[in-house]
Image: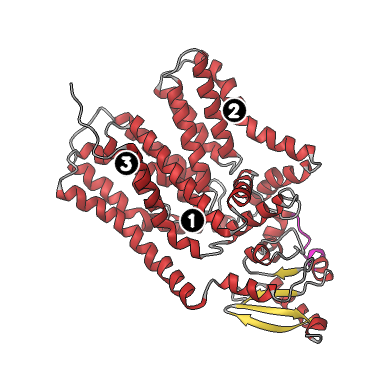
């Protein structure tokens, strides 16, 4: 029987999808930093390219994967923030392709799989997804691992083992970006075994190969740090610090954080949820894909559990729910049937328009307006400092963006460049920082410039550090909300 040829070729669709992702995230290219986390990743990656392993000159409690990705981007694409923006676009794009392939496997129609692929980059604009957060990277490896695992049973002989191994390897790569991915990986493996009715003996044969693939990236990372005599730093940052991180939460904060984060999630996703419910009510009854819909709902639930596990409830943790949410929408589209129905088209346009308009209004328009009028604030600060900063001199960014160290090419006065690690007693405990000793060591290095943002948070440690500056520093200039202090003896020789 003759089948109708798709209206658009795969190559055209892939090109359109790349253009779509670039268009949605284009305004981010004018920002040197969106949040502290991505600034830290850039700085660690840059230090690594200079020969300093992660955790040795800059501390963080993330696995090494995100730093490796950023290092490759800076090394291959150029030592600039634009390289990080571009590699983030590439990973979001690659995840869209993986979602499309997964949609083609789980669903029936090409159209529904395309809906999921084209909606995913839209919904990553919210929940702090504009920054280059880890979720935008490990989701690609997670979905590829799931695809390989589901494809393994289509293979025979040694090919099946190869698919299972590379599925594990992809899951292992995701784990080396964020360990909490283990919850999602466990769910995928359990679904794989249950949906395919694998016996205990069958799983017992596959498990060693899968486990080897999962463990290999972590084993290689540990071996690399051991070979370079920095295994202790790796173990502390990857295991001891996260353990302490779980300890610092307060019970009274859990409910408040959970409630506020869920409110943020529903404010961002309510249009998609409404479309799923309404289109589902209008759709044709379908029992054929009930198992797929249950899987996607359970995947969404697993994403919530993964988001809640650290008990910190940051918005970007919820980015892991966007892939199953988009696939649920795609499954509803498939049930609905006719893509030419006006209600269908209107519903999808509303789902697309709401997050895009909200992002443009809240972020893109203010960013572009500020950039056109004044330029990027961090770049302006860095440009001022670099005029007088000699090679080998220090600066100290007390409570501003760590990206300033990268932009100025200044020496780092401390490995704890993320401000809360020094300014917050709880985060100092996580990093093992003695606040008094650390600040004394920083100031003993006589940084040429010390930068302090307007301290609206009323932090006592910040007030103490600012007060100490009066002894040896004078006001140099204020750029937007950042006051730049110059060492007093240098000011007298200007």
On the image, the x and y values in percent for residue 341 come to: 15, 46
Give the image location of residue 438, x and y in percent: 79, 64
Report the residue at 50% width, 48% height from top.
136
Of residues 249 and 169, the one drawn nearer to the viewer in this rendering: 169
Look at the picture and state if 357 lies above or below 462.
above
Residue 260 in percent (x, y) is at: 45, 59
The magenta stretch spans residue 437: yes
Q: State the image quarter where residue 334 is shown.
A: top left
Q: In which quarter of the view is residue 441 placed?
A: bottom right
174 to 88, vertically: above or below: above
Pointer 2 residue: 213
Task: List the single residue furthest toward the left.
Answer: 341
Q: Earlier in the sequence, mark 3 or mark 1?
A: 3
* Residue 413 horizontal side relative to residue 97, left or right: right
Q: Name the residue under label 3.
A: 114
At x 22%, y 45%, the residue is 279
Judge from the rendering whether residue 476 lies leftward or rightward of residue 14; answer left or right. Answer: right
Task: Check if residue 249 falls in the magenta segment.
Answer: no
Query: Which of the colour schemes (rainbow, by chain, secondary structure, one colour) is used?
Result: secondary structure
């Amino acid at each position: 029987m003759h089948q109708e040829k798709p209206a658009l070729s795969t190559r055209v669709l892939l090109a359109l999808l790349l253009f779509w992702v670039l268009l949605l995230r284009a305004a981010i290219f004018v920002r040197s930093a969106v949040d502290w986390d991505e600034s830290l990743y850039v700085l660690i990656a840059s230090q690594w390219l200079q020969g300093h392993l992660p955790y040795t000159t800059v501390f963080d409690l993330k696995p090494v994967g995100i730093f490796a990705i950023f290092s490759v981007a800076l090394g291959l694409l150029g030592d600039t923030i634009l390289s990080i923006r571009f590699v983030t676009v590439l990973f979001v794009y690659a995840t869209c392709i993986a979602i499309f392939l997964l949609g083609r496997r789980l669903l029936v129609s090409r159209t529904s799989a395309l809906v999921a692929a084209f909606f995913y980059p839209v919904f990553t604009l919210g929940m702090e997804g504009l920054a280059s957060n880890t979720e935008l990277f490990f989701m690609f490896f997670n979905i590829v691992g799931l695809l390989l695992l589901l494809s393994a049973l289509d293979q025979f002989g040694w090919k099946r083992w190869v698919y299972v191994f590379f599925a594990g390897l992809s899951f292992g790569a995701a784990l080396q970006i964020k360990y909490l991915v283990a919850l999602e990986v466990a769910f995928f493996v359990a679904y794989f075994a249950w949906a395919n009715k694998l016996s205990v003996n069958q799983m017992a044969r596959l498990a060693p190969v899968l486990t080897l693939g999962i463990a290999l990236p972590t084993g290689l990372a540990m071996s690399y740090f051991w070979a370079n005599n920095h295994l202790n730093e790796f173990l502390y940052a990857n295991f001891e610090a996260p353990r302490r991180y779980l300890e610092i939460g307060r019970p009274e904060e859990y409910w408040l954080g959970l409630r506020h984060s869920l409110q943020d999630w529903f404010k961002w996703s309510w249009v998609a949820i409404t479309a799923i419910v309404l289109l589902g009510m209008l759709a044709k009854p379908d029992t054929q894909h009930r198992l797929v819909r249950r899987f996607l709902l359970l995947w969404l639930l697993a994403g919530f559990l993964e988001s809640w596990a650290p008990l910190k409830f940051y918005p970007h943790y919820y980015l892991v729910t966007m892939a199953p949410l988009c696939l649920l929408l795609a499954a509803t589209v498939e049930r609905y049937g006719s893509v030419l129905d006006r209600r269908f088209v209107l519903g999808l346009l509303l789902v697309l328009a709401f997050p895009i308009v909200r992002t443009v209004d809240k972020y893109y328009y203010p960013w572009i307006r500020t950039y056109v009028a004044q330029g990027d604030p961090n770049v302006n600060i860095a440009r001022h400092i670099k005029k007088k900063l000699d090679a080998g001199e220090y600066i100290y960014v007390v409570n501003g963006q760590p990206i300033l160290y990268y932009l100025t090419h200044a020496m780092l006065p401390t490995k704890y460049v993320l401000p809360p690690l020094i300014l917050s007693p709880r985060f100092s405990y996580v990093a093992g920082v003695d606040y008094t000793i650390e600040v004394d060591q920083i100031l003993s290095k006589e940084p040429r410039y010390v930068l302090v943002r307007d301290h609206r948070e009323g932090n006592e440690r910040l007030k103490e550090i600012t007060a100490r500056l009066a002894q040896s520093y004078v006001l140099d200039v204020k750029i937007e909300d950042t006051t730049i202090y110059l060492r007093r003896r240098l000011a007298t020789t200007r």
